[in-house]
Image (spheres, helix red, strand yellow):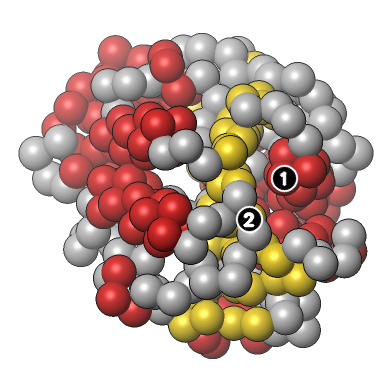
Amino acid sequence: MTKVLVAGSTGYIGSYVVQELKSREYWVRALVRTPDKIKKPGEHLEPAIENLADEFFMGDAIKVDTIAEVCNGIDVVFSSLGMTRPDFVHSSFDIDYKANLNLLRLAMKAKVKKFVYISVFNAHKMMDIENIQAHEKFVDELRASGIDYAIVRPTGYFSDMAQFLNMARTGVMVSLGEGEVKSNPIHGADLAKVCVDAIEGQDKNIDVGGPETFTFKEVGEMAADVVKKKPFTLSLPLWLADGVAAVTGFINRDIHDIALFATTVSRNDTVAPAHGTHRLRDFFEEMASKEG
């Protein structure tokens, strides 16, 4: 039986990957930094993994001494480790690069056969963003490691789209530019299937999006319809959003990264090959039902 280590196992993608691996009868070790997170579903409907993984390894990939044996006996490492929100302690390079590099070095030492990593679609167009630089610096390390690998590059997650629901509830929908750029975000369960296929397949680089393509304006309108509100739409010109992003650079590097990422994706379509069956409206309705 193939043994897989899942790093980022309690996050939006990692938890679905654990679930998908078990559905295909893999043996799964979940690397967990916060034990309480294994017991309950995530905030964006992702499954609790307490009864899914075969084994839990408690450690922090930033602190290599706490994970020294995490790859022992493992055939494949899957990592979706990455900074998803500012914590005002660690930088993007601490997590997206250094933590993953710690895992890679341990994988090499343990003679792991394959390493599958989640990066970002269209990263080459966003190399002025520190978070993207960190992702791609690790990708370079992975390619040079000698381990068989696959790099999965999703456009964006349904969990990212939940911000439109949050704005709709507040009554104010903020749009950067005209909101006409397009994207096809993907549900975590659909992306997990692609990730496990990557473990089993030969492709080294996999661009992936969901089955439906929307403009950001359409996503906002859908969110408003689901929560049955008509929010006031505040459209910020991109030149003004650029100025705000620049100012955040003097305040906090992680907030600056988020602001810079937002202005970048508001200028460029992010549409990748379509996968999966989950519909964004169904996700919005389930989220809205859960939160009353």
Q: Crowding at label 1, few (<14), some or many (≥20) Cα neighbours within 10 Å?
A: many
Image-quadrant location for residue 187:
top right
- How far across and down, in percent of the image, does residue 99 sit? 34, 57
Q: Is residue 90 above or below residue 249?
A: below
In this view, 143 is above or below 287: above
Question: Where does residue 169 sit, x and y in percent of width and height?
Answer: 61, 53
Residue at the spot 59% in from the left edge and 71% down from the top edge: 73
Q: Is residue 251 visible?
A: yes
Q: Are marks 2 and 1 in contact (CB under 8 Å)?
A: yes
Q: Which residue is mark 1?
A: 199
Q: In this view of the protein, can residue 174 be seen by the observer?
A: no
- Identify which amino acid the numbered label 1 is placed on: Ile
Image quadrant holding the C terminus, namely bottom right
Residue 83 image offset from top left, x and y in percent = 39, 52
Residue 29 image position (x, y, % from top left)? 63, 73
Which label was assigned to residue 69? none
- Say left or right for 183 vs 99: right
Question: What element does badge 1 sit on?
Answer: helix
Label 2 secondary element: strand
Task: Tell me which numbered mark, 2 or 1, is placed earlier along the sequence.
Answer: 2
Mark carried by residue 76: 2
Q: Which residue is nearer to you in this view: 23 or 50?
A: 23
Seen in the picture, residue 33 relative to 18 is either above or below; the reply is below
Which residue appears at 90% of the width and 39% of the height?
277
Looking at the rendered structure, the kind of residue marked 2 is: Val
Is 20 left, or right, of 58 in this rendering?
right
Asked whether, in this view, residue 94 is left or right of residue 207, the answer is left
The answer for how far apart the CA atoms under marks 2 and 1 are is 8 Å
